[in-house]
């Protein structure tokens, strides 16, 4: 934008540009900005004339940014964030009128724990904020850097200096099996675990955790006969087969009511499992972004307080039917 005469630049055009870029649709951006679609199109036309670039081209389901737009989005977001930071403060944000769509990638194990309470906060305090949930993958940090994701919850911290990171908390792993599994009694022991067959995440995804390495320390090498790309697939497969799964305890607690499965404590300690929240450092000063990530972290840490109040390693098995009220009193939340 070096050749653009700033006296001809209306700041609102940049707000519209950012909204269309984030939404990937002129109509969706119009809804988020509480503007009519023609008004958004008119603003884009003015910015296109000013920058001598189409900025967006039609694509399936909306629009796609041009090369010039991709080069502009980060500095424009940074500029809007800095303006908001110095003109106002997080306490002064007008949540009632804020219109913004955020893209969040959340691990399967985190989604049912953190997203519902976050959405309830948004509904009460900032109803104009919408969330688009995107799937996790191994190159998630690149999407954060490219501006394709506003926030990402994942099982490893990015190492780029351009990414801000906050630890969310530890992950406590348990085993799940179908009720009346022929090889499992009241509890698991090490020889039993060596003889079982497992359903697990793909080896690529398992590589982001310490589970297999920790098990090998105790002489346990899992025989994985089914690999899946989503954690949500594990409980349904376990419920209908003799395969055993190893998943975060809180995720198991959330889905146990939907499947005839039993949750078993592991006979060995699994340490070193953590999850993290990360975002592009350029968004540090974005008021709305800060409001959202602060509340997401607050939700996570409130749940982690409940987790820390319980001890693990009881060595006992817990079934869907006999845990009952004790589950509410001793549930561990573990991201």
Image: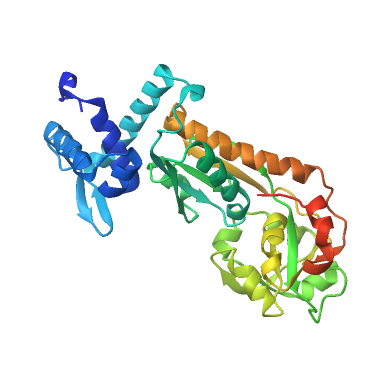
Identify which residue, 183 or 37, lies in the foreground. Answer: 37
**Which residue is rendered at x = 44% and y = 28% of the image?**
94
Identify which residue, 50 or 74, lies in the foreground. Answer: 50
**Which residue is rendered at x = 67% and y = 79% of the image?**
240
Q: Quadrant of residue 242?
A: bottom right
**x and y percent of residue 110 in the render?**
61, 52
User: Height in image: 164 above or below 30?
Assistant: above
**x and y percent of residue 7 in the render?**
17, 18
- In this view of the protein, can residue 212 be seen by the observer? no
Q: Is residue 70 left or right of residue 229?
A: left
Q: Is residue 169 left or right of residue 22?
A: right
Q: Quadrant of residue 4?
A: top left
**x and y percent of residue 129 in the render?**
44, 41
User: Height in image: 82 above or below 176?
Assistant: above
Q: Quadrant of the N terminus?
A: top left
Identify which residue, 263 or 122, lies in the foreground. Answer: 122
Q: Quadrant of residue 102?
A: top left
**x and y percent of residue 15 in the render?**
30, 33
């Amino acid at each position: 934008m070096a050749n653009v005469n700033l006296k001809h630049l209306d700041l609102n055009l940049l707000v519209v540009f950012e909204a269309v870029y984030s939404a990937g649709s002129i109509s969706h951006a119009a809804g988020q900005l509480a503007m009519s679609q023609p008004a958004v199109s008119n603003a884009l036309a003015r910015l296109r004339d000013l920058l001598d670039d189409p900025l967006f081209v039609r694509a399936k389901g909306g629009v796609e940014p041009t090369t010039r737009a991709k080069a502009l989005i980060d500095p424009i977001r940074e500029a809007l964030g800095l303006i908001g930071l110095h003109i106002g403060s997080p306490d002064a944000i007008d949540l009632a009128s804020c219109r913004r769509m955020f893209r969040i990638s959340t691990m399967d194990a985190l989604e049912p724990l953190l997203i519902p309470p976050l959405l309830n906060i948004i509904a009460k305090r900032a109803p104009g904020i919408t969330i688009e949930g995107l799937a996790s993958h191994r190159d998630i940090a690149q999407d954060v850097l490219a501006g394709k994701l506003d926030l990402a919850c994942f099982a490893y911290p990015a190492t780029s200096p351009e990414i801000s990171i906050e630890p969310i908390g530890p992950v406590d792993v348990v085993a799940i099996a179908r009720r009346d599994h022929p090889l499992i009694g009241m509890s698991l022991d090490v020889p039993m675990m060596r003889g079982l067959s497992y359903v697990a995440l793909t080896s690529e995804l398992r590589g982001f955790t310490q589970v297999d390495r920790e098990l090998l320390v105790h002489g346990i090498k899992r025989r994985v006969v089914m690999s899946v790309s989503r954690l949500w697939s594990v409980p349904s497969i376990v419920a209908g087969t003799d395969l055993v799964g190893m998943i975060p305890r809180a995720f198991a607690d959330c889905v146990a009511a939907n499947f005839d499965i039993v949750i078993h404590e592991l006979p060995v300690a699994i340490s070193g499992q953590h999850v993290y929240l990360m975002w592009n450092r350029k968004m540090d000063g974005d008021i709305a972004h800060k409001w959202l990530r602060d509340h997401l972290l607050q939700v996570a840490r409130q749940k982690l307080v409940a987790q820390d109040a319980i001890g693990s390693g009881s060595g006992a098995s817990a079934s869907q039917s006999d845990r009952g009220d004790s589950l509410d009193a001793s549930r561990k939340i573990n991201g």
